[in-house]
Amino acid sequence: MKIEGKNATILKVLALVLWLGVMVFAGKAFYDHRNWKETVVLGPGVTSTRSLHEWFVPLAGSTNDCNVYVLDSGVPGSTILVLGGTHPEEPATTLAAELLVENAKPTSGRLMVAIHTNRSASTVTRPGEAYPQFYSIKTDWGQKKYRMGDRSANPLDSWPDPETYVHFPSGQMLAYMDIRNINRTWPGRPNGLICEQTAFAFMEMIRKEKVDLVIDLHEAELEYPVIGTIVAHQDAQEIAAMASMELSAGEFRIGMEVSPRSLHGLTHREIGDFSDATALLFESPEPFLDRVRGATNEKLLLTGQDDFVLKAGKAGLLYWPIDEKGWPIELRVGRHVATIEKVLEVWGMMYPEKPIALDGLPSYTELTEKGVGAFFADPSALAKDKVALE
Amino acid sequence: MNDAVMILYYAMTAFFAVCLAWNFVKTKNLQKAFLYLVVLMPFVMRLIRLK
């Protein structure tokens, strides 16, 4: 449609005003999401809160300079590092890590926890897939709000992607976007992009703090074969096998598999190969991630109930069972917390000279009955030094 | 090196944003004016580091 003269100017100004309105509306939503601060209550076991840059200075002030919570019993034993939020679109991982920080009290050894291992990935979602920007967990004192994230780091922090991502140091060629997926960048390098630098910082921490075992928490779609399982570096396969057998005989079914030697960049491969620590990765089921899912919203994220995923399950197209009850968040967090406890118990049996034991954690039954929120205290009712911001 | 590549990409983004804005100013076709504005959005969002 041709426009001429004074009308043209008026119409263009109107279009510009409309455009500005849309930009401000969308821009504010993106800004609020990226700058949202989650509150973490420092539980009775927390002895210090450190920053990742303490082990690799160039990360100071970057988006991925995450908090590392140290829970030191003061009694000699092993040091265990738990990584939540490697993929922030897997909320059971960050919630389980937060639950440890707020409730765990080591009686021997030392526990270190990162709630947002790849914090940059927590500052972006997938609007094109209708991901919600936030989700809330019901607690005894109200709703606790969390930021929903993505699998890969925010392009604002790591851009542009290479055409092919060549993993360091193996030289294995991986998909271009995996340069922003921290679980493809281990063991990292100091002069790489942000995920490579972050993985390098964690490796420095693991080496300098003499971490014995790293546990990386994940969730997976039911269409994916690696689900409901513990993936173990070969040095940790006996621990994983024992934990898997004991949990499957008691509380819930969980599998075990050994990390492939030729698949690079993953925690369960590279941490074991490039440090004295060994590594395990846990996967819980998250129907929200399935490609056949229906409405992609907060309800699906927290209940894990979806008619389309259910139908796929009934047709035998999934690798993990699902029924009308779905996979609610409390079950998924409960699986992670119970598996951590079981692994530490087995660790203590195998290395009695370097035990680590945690008190204060809810049992799987308590978590599934009361919900995750029942174990989170109200940060507004506490002194400022008892609360950290993520 | 990474930083240099990133700065070049931002420079490219700015260049295309200016081109789109200039086309918006010059066009006498309302449909095209709207089109230029819609296409301009992600370029501006990236330049001001919102998305």
Image (cartoon, rainbow, N blue to C red):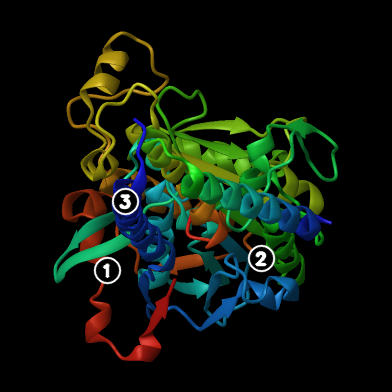
Q: Is residue A323 above or below residue B3?
A: above
Lower sequence index among marks 1 and 2: 2
For image coordinates 18% across by 32% down, the residue present is A325
Lower sequence index among marks 3 and 1: 3
Q: Quadrant of residue A52?
A: bottom right
Q: Secondary structure at mark 1?
A: loop
Going by the picture, which residue comes out furthest to the front? Answer: A5
Q: Determine which residue is flagged by label 3.
A: A6
Q: Determine which residue is flagged by label 2.
A: A353
Chain letter, disc 3 residue: A
Q: Quadrant of residue A65?
A: bottom right
Q: Report the amino acid beneath label 3.
A: Lys
Q: Report the amino acid beneath label 2.
A: Glu
Badge 2: how crowded within 10 Å, few (<14), some, or many (20+)? few
Chain letter, disc 1 residue: A
Q: Which mark's residue is nearer the viewer, 1 or 2? A: 1
Q: Mark 2 vs mark 3: same chain?
A: yes
Distance from the alpha carbon under mark 3 to that under mark 1? 62 Å
Q: Quadrant of residue A292?
A: top left
For image coordinates 42% across by 70% down, the residue present is A101
Chain letter, disc 2 residue: A
Distance from the alpha carbon under mark 2 to that under mark 3? 86 Å
Q: Position of residue A189 (x, y in %)?
A: 80, 56
Q: Which mark's residue is nearer the viewer, 2 or 3? A: 3
Q: Position of residue A22 (x, y in %)?
A: 32, 53
Can you tell which mark lies on residue A376? 1
Along the line of sight, the residue nearer the viewer: A173 or A43: A173
Badge 1: how crowded within 10 Å, few (<14), some, or many (20+)? many
Screen quadrant of the C terminus of chain A: bottom left
